[in-house]
Image: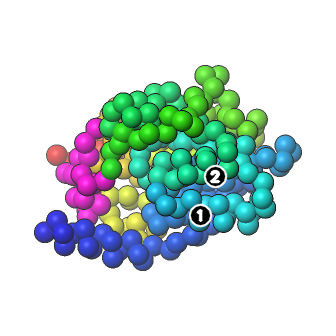
Amino acid sequence: MREETRQSLASGLTSVKHDQTMPVANDVTQLTLKFVNVCFVAESSRQRWVLIDTALPKQENRIVAWAERIFGNQPPAAIILTHGHFDHVGSALALSRHWQVPLYANTLEFPYLTGLKPYPPADASAGGGIISHLSPLFPRGPFHLEDVLSPLPEDGSVPGLDSWRWISTPGHTPGHVSFFREEDKTLVAGDAFVTVQQESLHQVVLQRAKLSGPPRYFTPDWEQAYESIRRLAALKPAVVTAGHGPPIGGTLLTKGLEHMLNHFRVDHMPKR
């Protein structure tokens, strides 16, 4: 049964549109690679840009190709991680070495990124769906990025992006962070919450916008996850790009965050 499910997952993911870019806000572009997003964020006034997250392994050539379409041969000022799960750090080392730029993460993620310990086991019973069922097979690390890894500044500033700040949003992982630009209320949420029901292969293939809590199978601390979403909702974001799903804004975002918080325990936490 597990092998049949694995084949179903592989077949379904081939239906997800590859290499699809979508504008999020001024100087912010989301690139979807299979079922995960990376984000190109520029600061035009300073003529520089950064890459947020790096998708699955062996995606570096696609990411570099899209970066060159947008920015020419200009390398990023930095690569920054929202967190260290396999689908966000997969191409980090290759990209850091290719561009010869540092890789930044919250220090609370360092144990998982420097070979010290793996992330907690996946919870296959959390949320149902094929992806949840197969989640124990997903890599948990530890990953070895210590040669290129640097800590995010403690003051909340973002390397290479003067108009942005990083925000601690734990729950999905201990050191998960999100990024916010106050001037136009643009949010890069990572997996603090997502915009597609990530546990369902059907929804992942469709990429139909729907606010959902962090992926259930890899979220160990639900009290922290709730507080992180509450903290992000209090910022009143106008538009969001998340680690999974299409960018959304307007009423769909504001009402969706309100509904999520009001129904979090019933609709978003794992059902036992």
Which badge, 2 or 1, comes first in the chain's sequence? 1
- Considering depth in this image, is 151 or 123 the residue closer to the camera? 151
Magenta stretch: residue 121 in it?
Answer: yes
- Considering depth in this image, is 77 or 153 the residue closer to the camera? 77
Depicted 216 relative to depicted 252: above or below: above
Could you tell me residue 197's position as x and y percent?
38, 59
Could you tell me residue 162's position as x and y percent?
76, 35
- Considering depth in this image, is 161 or 141 the residue closer to the camera? 141
Q: Secondary structure at mark 2?
A: helix
Could you tell me residue 146's position as x and y percent?
50, 34
149 relative to 50 in the view: left or right: left
Residue lying at 36% horizontally and 39% vertically, measured from the top left: 142
Label of residue 191 in the image: none
Residue lying at 47% horizontally and 66% vertically, measured from the top left: 34
Could you tell me residue 102's position as x and y percent?
64, 38
**Which residue in the structure is indicated by mark 1?**
61
Q: Secondary structure at mark 1?
A: helix
Depicted 147 relative to depicted 69: above or below: above
Residue lying at 13% horizontally and 69% vertically, measured from the top left: 1
Q: Amino acid at mark 1?
A: Asn
**Which residue in the structure is indicated by mark 2?**
98
Residue lying at 16% horizontally and 65% vertically, measured from the top left: 2
The magenta span reads: 120-138
- The quadrant in which residue 184 appears is top right
